Image (cartoon, grey):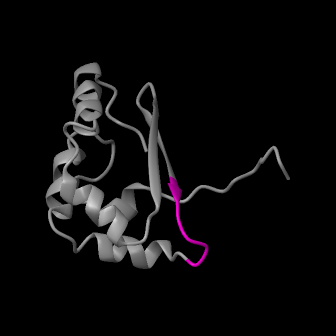
Amino acid sequence: MDLRDEPALIARYRKAHSQEEAWPEIREGIRQVGILEMEVYIQGNRLVMIVETPLDFNWDEAMSRLATLPRQAEWEEFVAQFQQCDKNATSDQKWRMMERIFYLYE
């Protein structure tokens, strides 16, 4: 996902995702849908998210459930101001699965 290429907005987005500022309901919701670990990396205005899940994890089901959890819609509306995507998009519409094309240990 890409953020709006505005340094002030990127700084606010970073702060919103810091340990001090991240909404506890969002962290809890991520765990409730079965996500074990989540990392978001930034380079300029480009974001990449890495998600660790159980082997039987169903992304579509989890994202559908996540959208119904407390404060999730409010969070999506809040972060939409920073992101280059539809302001009404849900998390599963913003974050798309990538195909791994290289793995050193294979």
Indicate whether 79 appears above or below 67.
Answer: above
| Magenta stretch in the rendered image | 51-56
55 is within the stretch colored magenta: yes
Figure quadrant of residue 7? top left
Where's residue 1, x and y in %? Answer: 43, 45
Q: Is residue 26 left or right of residue 100?
A: left
Closer-to-camera residue (14/52): 52
Closer-to-camera residue (4/105): 105
Indicate whether 16 appears above or below 71.
Answer: above
Indicate whether 46 appears above or below 22.
Answer: above
What kind of secondary structure does the magenta stretch mostly adopt? loop
Closer-to-camera residue (93/12): 12
Figure quadrant of residue 89? bottom left
Q: How many marks?
A: 0
Where's residue 75, x and y in %? Answer: 19, 54
Closer-to-camera residue (36/12): 36
Where's residue 102, x and y in %? Answer: 77, 47
| Residue shown at 42% from the left, 79% from the top | 61
| Residue shown at 20% from the left, 53% from the top | 24
Outermost residue to the top = 7
| Residue shown at 46% from the left, 62% from the top | 36
18 is within the stretch colored magenta: no
| Residue shown at 22% from the left, 38% from the top | 16
Q: Is residue 67 left or right of residue 105?
A: left
Where's residue 52, x and y in %? Answer: 53, 59
